Image: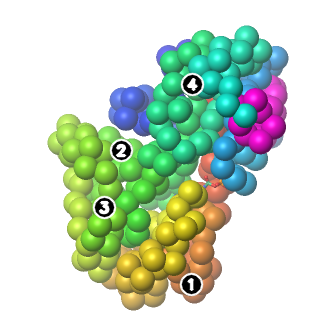
Amino acid sequence: MYNELKGRDFLSLKDYSTEEIKLLLDLAVKLKSEHKQGIRHDILKGKTLAMIFNKASTRTRVSFEIGMFQLGGMAYFLSIQDLQLGRGEPIKDTARVLSRYVDGILIRTYAQSEVEELAKYADVPVINGLTDLYHPTQALADMLTILEHKQKLSGIKLAYIGDGNNMVHSLMIAGTKLGMEVRVATPKGYEPSADVTKMCQDFAKASGGKLILGNDPEQASIGADVLYTDVWASMGQEKEAEERKKHFQDFQINKKILGLADSKAIVMHCLPAHTGEEITEEVFESSQSVVFDEAENRLHAHKAILAALL
Ligand code: CP
Ligand code: NVA
């Protein structure tokens, strides 16, 4: 059960087939259920994960660290400020050094190319803990959350309202590979990357899913099973935050948008949230919001990734 994906990197869900994503989700469901029953595994006994962070993190850092511990292994948090990498040591050297010590490397940074370079030179699996382009570990956990609340993924209508950022790129990939109808509403000029869009249109064609891009949040929300949003300005875009606020005013999940969705729709946000901006406090705290289930599922989805790859 744990052998199919051994040794693989986890840089983007685009590199995983629908079957492989489903395998990870099955594993996450199993590990979560066993954890809740008090069944413990030490399948990663003696294994170690180095975690390089070049951006802030609460959920990703804590859930990977605790996930390693719960599976019998150990994680090392490495802040960029404390690493020689932060003083200019090349990524390719860091990759080769860490590969001599640890069994896996997680990295959160800016450019996807940095993660790819790390993976190219590392002898151990590299996991993308968020770049400006993708956030695949979050998207996997989100699929688990949707599956739990909706009992299926194929055919689910997911409406993402907000910035065409790392989060929506990974949701588009996961969603179109799993046969969902992914609707994306962004302000003009903040659309998802054209390359990712093209790729996801092909995934949708192959899976029987759909990808619909537009600039109308109301249109996107009609009859949706899942409403999803993320911050208007991501990490690294702090200087643009004020300017972005002007363009994103209408791209908020609020009572009106929720009223257009299916009456049993769930509301999701990868967190951290800026309530009053991309989502109202009222909707964030409503019974339809599953944001803390989503945060919890990072732990279970990450344990599946670790158990499968390391
Ligand atoms: N959603 C998410 O990745 O949270 P952190 O930035 O806290 O890791
Ligand atoms: N898009 C956000 C996600 C944070 C988890 C960012 O990159 O800051």
Relative depth, front residue between 220 and 26: 220
Task: Tell me the tag on residue 118.
Answer: 4
Tell me which image quadrant ligand 1 sits in.
Answer: bottom right
N-terminal of the pair, mark 2 or mark 3, is 2
Q: Quadrant of residue 107?
A: top right
Q: In the image, is residue 84 part of the stretch drawn in magenta?
A: yes
Q: Amino acid at mark 3?
A: Glu
Percent x, y of residue 305: 59, 32
State the extent of the magenta-drawn residues as a range.
66-86
Q: Residues within 10 Å of mark 4 (few under 14, many from 20)?
A: many
- Dot 4 falls on a residue whose secondary structure is helix
- Dot 1 falls on a residue whose secondary structure is loop
Percent x, y of residue 193: 31, 51
| Residue that numbered label 1 is attached to | 276
* Furthest residue in direction left, as rendered: 205
Q: Amino acid at mark 2?
A: Ile
Instruction: Tell me the CA gap for discs 4 and 1.
Output: 38 Å
Q: Amino acid at mark 4?
A: Leu
| Residue that numbered label 2 is attached to | 173
CB-based contact (under 8 Å), mark 4 and mark 1 = no
Q: Residues within 10 Å of mark 3 (few under 14, many from 20)?
A: some
